[in-house]
Image (cartoon, helix red, strand yellow):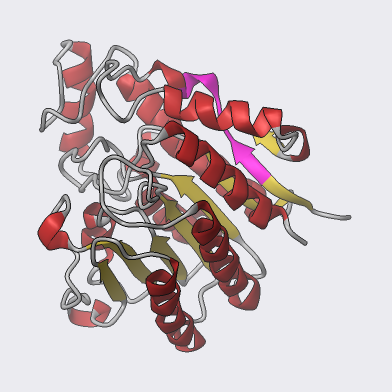
Amino acid sequence: MRLAETGLVYGEIYLKHETGHRHPEKPQRLTAIMETLETTGLLDKLLLIEPAPAERSFLELCHTSRYIDEFKSAVEHSDPFLNSPECILSPATFEVALCAVGGVLKGIDKVIEGTVRNCFCAVRPPGHHAESYRAMGFCFFNNVAIAARYLQKQHAIERILVIDWDVHHGNGTQYMFDKDPTIYFVSLHQDPSSCYPGTGKVSETGYGQGKGFTQNFPMPAGAGEEEYLKALEKVEQAMDKFRPQFVLISAGFDAHISDPLAHVSLTTKGYEELTRRIKSIAEGYAEGRLVSVLEGGYNLDALAESVEKHIRVLMEG
């Protein structure tokens, strides 16, 4: 049986998390992506995977029970935000966040069972800033972190590479895994001295048994494809020893030169090459098994174009 190359996780439920027209993390991010995939004819070539809410037991692999209850209660009581003002709540936010996690887990299931070779998850809200006990930076549940633990618990995958190329450091993901030698976390992000959330220094390499299984690559303002590819060379070298069995990407597209929230200068072509290099890691060690999960990206045109090119590379034979 020939594999369908690439799956796409998407559902209109993701548009129901309403943040207001001035908030950068808005539903139009996904409608821009979907319109571009339809216009270019890519949508018909992907296996559409409909999301479903994640079970609470899977949320608790990474988040405290108390935090989950606080999030649900805040929505039920019509609180305007959770933990910090950028984490805006609307009546459907809790349900949408459950479906963001659940969609990623369904994408993983399709890859593991061989229905698709890899998968892109067009989900929101994003996840990589969310810590075990609090929301941060537009994020409520840490989609990728939960996905990694799900792979281990549900599918007996032992070693997982998580690469986060969002322009903002994936603090939540790092903190969940920084004592764990089974999850190799890599973040390529703008220098934390000049960019939210202010974490992700080179010196942050993990603790205890997890020492050496965290790699941070802070990028100076204006950095582009050359700097990112040099960083990936070091990651490729580390994978000779780690030998991941699955690859997860926290795929933020806000390091694009046109993005309004940061000052890194990746181009759409740069994202193509990053995708190609990371896909090569998955093919070399993990039987090609890769799931990419949307994080940031706030210039709608740049986001949609970059995602289109990203998916085209995932579809390459």
Residue 276 sits in quarter: bottom right
Q: Position of residue 173 (x, y in %)?
A: 28, 56
In-front residue for pair 312/80: 312
Q: Position of residue 107 (x, y in %)?
A: 58, 44
In-front residue for pair 281/305: 305
User: Which residue is rendered at x = 15% and y = 51% of the image?
Assistant: 197
Q: Work out which quarter of the rendered image holds the N terminus and state it.
A: bottom right
Q: How many numbered circles are shown? A: 0
The reply to whether residue 54 is visible in this rendering is no
User: Which residue is rendered at x = 51% and y = 64% of the image?
Assistant: 274
Assess whether residue 186 is covered by the magenta stretch. no
Residue 286 sits in quarter: bottom right
Q: Which residues are magenta?
A: 7-14
User: Which residue is rendered at x = 50% and y = 88% of the image?
Assistant: 240
Left or right, 8 with respect to 25, comes to right
The reply to whether residue 124 is visible in this rendering is yes
Q: Work out which quarter of the rendered image holds the C terminus and state it.
A: bottom right
Q: Is residue 288 above or below residue 52?
A: below
In-front residue for pair 203/245: 203
Q: Position of residue 207 (x, y in %)?
A: 17, 77
Left or right, 146 with respect to 12, comes to left
